[in-house]
């Protein structure tokens, strides 16, 4: 991190470029001290006069990026369904605003659709005697939930951020939440100065409609309000207004004529531009507003200034301003109470109280249910409110602070049916029946049919990745993503969430075409993708990278077909039911031949043949067999900067899904052999999968990488983010993913149950190892990440510590879902998303 900005450190490096860019501007420096006067004499005078009604120079500003992806909090208002959808009404207005928090500040904030970002970040800049601090870089951050129960469990997604100056000169306390009755984000601020001469400035960097490259900003001096839109005629509009009037304000281009650049020059806000364009030209803009300096009175040691700040959104300026003004008029106390669900308001605490399974599940956590409650809130918050049931992967852009924001990107704010399935099953596990049903019905939107734009070929499979409105983004075929909607439908039917009539309807409309594709495959022609799919071979496995025969994909396909067979029997489609079951059994019979190596280079042990001097390697599952010939030296493809290696060298814990779903016995010898290899911590780091970390009670808990030779992560040599220079490098290394600790916990529970060894002591040991293990990976805001630092190589510019979440994506919905399912499984002493019908049918 950088330290506080001092005038002499920055002014000489910026003066020449600033003078050239701003030579035509008129402004007068304020000379505060001898030091500042001497600095000024070394620079070219930038401008003189008053620019209150002038246009900011320096278009388009610095290239825009997104914010740090390791979020410590996310939030939105809770909204109840009306007949399975979100419907605006006077009694139930829908707020379509989401926000995230990172590094002590508000980061990406969405309005409209959940992927439609409007803001990169909003923070305070603080000036004083000889310094200019940025809140993100120069303060120590803490976060807590504003609304908790007596045990400290969060009851809503309202947060308190406290950022303290490292030198003890000031403190910034912020309470952050959305207005459930309007499209607005509210922040209550309490700014405390502990010495005189401290001045706070608000800094806002908009990225309207998912891009930071074409924004236009204005400041209305009469009404003390900022507005921002894009050059598009259908642009969203963002407004920023405070309950305490700004002392002065300006708009400008980032790095050129914005307020931070201005303050770096001499510690004063000299530029006061009222607009960034008068010709509908956009760029990367920033808003800057000065607040009154807190005045410390005689005999006092501190002074405070408090105010409400609102960011309002709308489809036009009038609506945006109306939302902003109305939220300000309501005030932060009233808005927060409604957000929480206090009194007659329906809010987050009401949602939590509707989850009847949570209370029992708390007993199998090691943090008294704090992460469990947070996970319930986080999963529900990552649903779009225009397209009900659209569950996204994460409210973040991976490695966002090194990713260009010139062109809009959804990042992880999109629908993958695989992540989607994990979340829907977690909702069901914690007692929410409405959301998984609505989610299941949503899946029709992302299934390939004859009406899919631009598609020719065999229908029935589910799209790889889409926007929440169904817009196609990625078009690879992943057979597990086609099987999981069938599995989800069967589970909902068995739970009574879907009636017999409803499952029959969805079988004919959505599930049968999916099952037919799993049996027959077929020709696919969509965008770049032209391929003929022949199951069990999948074009992409669950890591969306390579084609071949995958144990985890196979587990889902077999389970999906047996689930489809059961539903088909119910509907009277006996011929299809038999075909699905026969195909599933045939697939199971081929698992060993297609995905298990007996000539493995990583054999767990060898044993002598009594009749010869030959040795026999113990068989184990490979991560992927490209051609279904696991005993050969076939290389996997290059991926994420890593060159492909012999298929027999690469381990992946995905084979455990065979046990979880009921395809393979937990005590199967090949499974046991592969587990032993996964646990081998003596493997070189590139091939090694398992790492251990210290839990809060001092014990060691396990963490696992996706697979050996994974490159989806930071560069272990120079510490760069993934593909930071615009291309993959050979030093990239995928790190530990916390949800694998949950997957392993499910396997260990299944093994204990199978061997009849689950007593009270062993049960508590499982909880302490795997439930506590996942809790160990949560950050201070109780957000679970996609990846955590494994301690290998360069700890990057962020100086990561082992078990700390990285900048890949936090919170990851899949990780929170796996935690919820693991806690439910430990509570029930039964694997939650096991399919007993799969085991039963395969034995017949």
Image: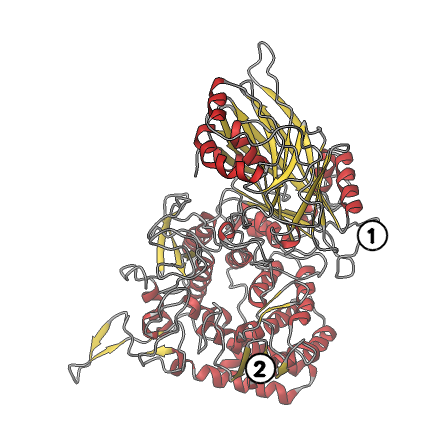
Residue position for label 2: 524
Judge from the rendering whether residue 471 lies leftward or rightward of residue 721; answer left or right. right
Inspect this view and state whether residue 496 appears.
no
The N terminus lies in which quarter of the figure?
Answer: top left
The answer to which quarter of the image holds residue 737 is bottom left
The answer to which quarter of the image holds residue 517 is bottom right
Of residues 733 and 275, the one nearer the viewer is: 275
- The structure residue drawn at horizontal position 46% and vertical position 76%, both measured from the top left corner, is 547
Mark 1 neighbour class, 10 Å CA radius: few under 14, some 14 to 19, many 20 or more: few
Say above or below: 686 vs 803.
Answer: below
- The structure residue drawn at horizontal position 61% and vertical position 41%, both measured from the top left corner, is 57
- The structure residue drawn at horizontal position 65% and vertical position 83%, both measured from the top left corner, is 569
Q: Secondary structure at mark 2?
A: strand
Image disc number at residue 89: 1
Work out which residue is located at the far top of the displayed protein and give it. 299
Inspect this view and state whether residue 192 appears.
yes
Residue 147: x percent and y percent?
Answer: 63, 38
Residue 73: x percent and y percent?
Answer: 57, 45
Tell me which label, 2 or 1, sits earlier in the chain. 1
Of residues 586 and 599, the one nearer the viewer is: 599
Mark 2 neighbour class, 10 Å CA radius: few under 14, some 14 to 19, many 20 or more: many
Of residues 205 and 339, the one nearer the viewer is: 205
Image disc number at residue 225: none
> Spatial distance from mark 2 to mark 1, Cα to Cα?
43 Å
Q: Secondary structure at mark 1?
A: loop
Of residues 593 and 722, the one nearer the viewer is: 722
Work out which residue is located at the far left of the displayed protein and give it. 613
Residue 572: x percent and y percent?
Answer: 69, 85
Eye-nearest disc, 2 or 1:
2
Q: What colour-coding does the image apply?
A: secondary structure
Residue 514: x percent and y percent?
Answer: 61, 79
Say above or below: 289 vs 501.
Answer: above
């Amino acid at each position: 991190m950088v330290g506080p900005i001092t005038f002499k450190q920055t002014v000489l490096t910026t003066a020449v470029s600033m003078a050239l860019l701003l030579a035509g501007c008129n402004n007068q420096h304020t000379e505060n001290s001898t030091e500042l006067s001497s600095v000024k004499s070394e620079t070219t005078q930038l401008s003189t006069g008053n620019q209150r009604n002038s246009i900011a120079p320096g278009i388009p500003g610095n290239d825009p990026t997104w914010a740090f992806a390791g979020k410590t909090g996310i939030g939105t208002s809770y909204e109840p369904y009306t007949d399975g959808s979100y419907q605006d009404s006077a009694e139930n207005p829908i707020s379509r605003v989401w926000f995230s928090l990172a590094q002590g500040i508000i980061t990406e904030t969405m309005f409209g659709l959940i992927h439609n970002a409007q803001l990169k970040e909003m923070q305070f800049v603080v000036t004083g005697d000889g310094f200019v601090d940025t809140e993100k870089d120069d303060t120590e951050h803490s976060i807590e939930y504003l609304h908790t129960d007596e045990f400290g469990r969060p009851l809503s997604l309202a947060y308190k951020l406290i950022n303290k100056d490292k030198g003890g000169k000031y403190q910034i306390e912020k309470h952050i939440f959305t207005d459930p009755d309007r499209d607005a984000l509210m922040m209550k601020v309490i700014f405390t100065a502990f010495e005189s001469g401290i001045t706070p400035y608000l800094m806002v960097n908009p990225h309207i409609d998912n891009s930071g490259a074409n924004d236009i900003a204005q400041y209305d001096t009469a009404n003390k309000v900022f507005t921002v839109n894009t050059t598009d005629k259908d642009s969203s509009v963002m407004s920023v207004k405070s309950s305490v009037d700004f002392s002065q304000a300006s708009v400008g281009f980032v790095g050129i004529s914005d307020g931070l650049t201005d303050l770096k020059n001499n510690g004063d806000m000299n530029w006061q531009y009222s607009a960034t364009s008068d010709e509908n030209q956009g760029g990367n803009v920033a808003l800057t507003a000065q607040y009154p300096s807190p005045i410390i009175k005689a005999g006092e040691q501190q002074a405070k200034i408090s105010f409400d700040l609102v960011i309002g959104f709308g489809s036009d300026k009038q609506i945006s301003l109306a939302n902003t003004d109305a939220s300000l008029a309501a005030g932060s106390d009233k808005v927060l109470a409604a957000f929480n669900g206090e009194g007659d308001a329906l809010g987050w605490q009401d949602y939590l109280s509707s989850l009847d399974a949570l209370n029992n599940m708390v007993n199998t956590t090691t943090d008294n249910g704090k992460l469990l409650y947070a996970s319930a809130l986080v999963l529900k918050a990552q649903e779009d409110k225009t397209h009900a049931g659209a569950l996204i992967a994460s409210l973040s852009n991976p490695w966002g602070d090194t990713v260009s924001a010139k062109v809009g990107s959804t990042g992880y704010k999109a629908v993958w049916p695989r992540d989607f399935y994990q979340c829907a099953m977690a909702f069901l596990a914690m007692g929410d029946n409405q959301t998984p049903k609505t989610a299941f019905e949503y899946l029709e939107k992302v299934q390939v049919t004859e009406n899919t734009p631009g598609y020719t070929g065999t229908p029935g499979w589910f799209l790889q990745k889409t926007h929440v409105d169904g817009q196609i983004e990625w078009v690879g075929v992943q057979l597990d993503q086609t099987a999981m909607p069938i599995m989800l439908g069967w589970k909902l039917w068995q739970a009574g969430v879907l009636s017999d009539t409803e499952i029959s309807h969805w079988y004919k409309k959505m599930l049968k075409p999916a099952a037919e594709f799993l049996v027959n495959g077929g020709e696919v022609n969509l965008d770049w993708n032209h391929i003929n799919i022949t199951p069990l071979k999948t074009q992409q496995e669950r890591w969306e990278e390579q084609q071949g025969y995958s144990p985890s994909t196979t587990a889902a396909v077999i389970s999906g077909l047996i689930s489809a067979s059961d539903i088909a029997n119910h509907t009277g489609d006996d011929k299809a039911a038999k075909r699905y079951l026969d195909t599933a059994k045939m697939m199971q019979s081929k698992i060993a031949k297609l995905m298990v190596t007996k000539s493995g280079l990583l054999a767990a042990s060898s044993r002598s043949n009594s009749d010869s001097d030959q040795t026999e390697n113990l068989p184990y599952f490979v991560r992927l067999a490209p051609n279904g010939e696991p005993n050969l030296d076939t290389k996997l493809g290059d991926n994420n900067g890593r060159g492909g290696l012999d298929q027999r060298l690469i381990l992946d814990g995905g084979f455990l899904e065979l046990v979880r779903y009921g395809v393979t016995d937990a005590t199967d010898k090949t499974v046991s052999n592969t587990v032993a290899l996964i646990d081998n911590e003596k493997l070189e780091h590139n091939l090694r999968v398992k790492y251990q970390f210290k839990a809060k009670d001092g014990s060691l808990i396990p963490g696992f990488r996706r697979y050996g030779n994974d490159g989806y992560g930071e560069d272990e040599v120079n510490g760069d983010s993934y593909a930071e220079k615009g291309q993959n490098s050979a030093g990239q290394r995928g790190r530990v993913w916390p949800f694998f600790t949950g997957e392993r916990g499910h396997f260990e529970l299944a093994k204990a149950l199978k061997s009849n060894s689950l007593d009270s002591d062993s049960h508590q040991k499982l909880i302490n190892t795997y439930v506590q293990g996942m809790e160990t990976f949560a950050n201070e805001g109780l957000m679970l990440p996609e990846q955590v630092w494994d301690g290998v190589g360069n700890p990057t510019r962020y100086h990561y510590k082992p078990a700390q979440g990285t900048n890949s994506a936090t919170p990851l919905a899949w990780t929170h879902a796996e935690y919820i399912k693991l806690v439910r499984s430990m509570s029930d002493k039964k694997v939650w998303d096991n399919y007993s019908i799969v085991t039963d049918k395969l034995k017949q």
